Image (tube, rainbow, N blue to C red):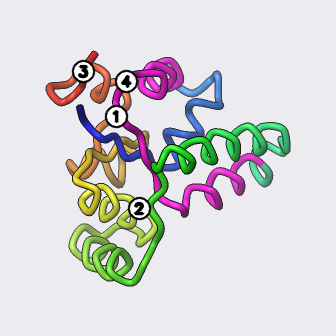
Amino acid sequence: MTLWLLDASVLLAREDLDDANHSQTVRLLGGPDPLATLDLAFYEVTNVAVRSWHDELAARRLWERLSALAEDGGLIRADSQLLRDATLIAEEHGISVYAAAYVAAARIANGQLVSCDVRDLVSLGLACLPSDAISGPRGNR
């Protein structure tokens, strides 16, 4: 089984019915493989739900989903090593430390990063799309 490390964009796509990655994300999150995310996701998804969507109910649903991941042992907390690794990854690839933190977390957890961020992560080979996760060679679908 593959550990899928989800970034905030995947969690948001699960909530957003209009997102192009919504249906694949629903399948991925409902599948048998273990899931994890970074503690940073709590802040990122809340920011989008409250500031961009103006939807506090969506924020609550996202918190509940993240809390369920955490209860299952799928929450990776940022620590000094992860932040050092993220800084190096950010510099190497010219991406934000936020995005690089998910890359670092996936590497530390020996998992595969899943993201909807084509520009900064998928196009650089640092993550796969939800559709690739459910149908790709590492997926168990």
Mark 1 or mark 4, which is nearer to you? 4
Does the magenta-highlighted stretch encompass residue 42? yes
| Label 1, label 4: how far apart the Cα atoms are | 17 Å
Task: Judge whether 36 appears above or below 130 on screen.
Answer: below
Q: Which residue was labeled with disc 4?
A: 32
Which quadrant is the N terminus positioned in? Answer: top left
**What's under tag 1, amino acid-wise?**
Leu
Find residue 129 and name its label: 1
Q: Is residue 105 left or right of residue 124?
A: right
| Label 2, label 1: how far apart the Cα atoms are | 14 Å
**What's under tag 3, amino acid-wise?**
Asn
**What's under tag 4, amino acid-wise?**
Pro
- Asked if labels 4 and 1 touch by Cβ distance under 8 angstroms, the answer is no
Q: Position of residue 16 (x, y in %)?
A: 65, 29
Q: Is residue 68 left or right of residue 61?
A: left
Which region shows up in magenta? 22-49
Q: Secondary structure at mark 4?
A: loop
Q: Position of residue 121 (x, y in %)?
A: 32, 51
Q: Which residue was labeled with disc 3?
A: 140
Magenta segment's dominant SS is helix
Q: Which residue was labeled with disc 2?
A: 99
Q: Quadrant of residue 101?
A: bottom left
- Asked if labels 4 and 3 touch by Cβ distance under 8 angstroms, the answer is yes
Mark 4 or mark 2, which is nearer to you? 4
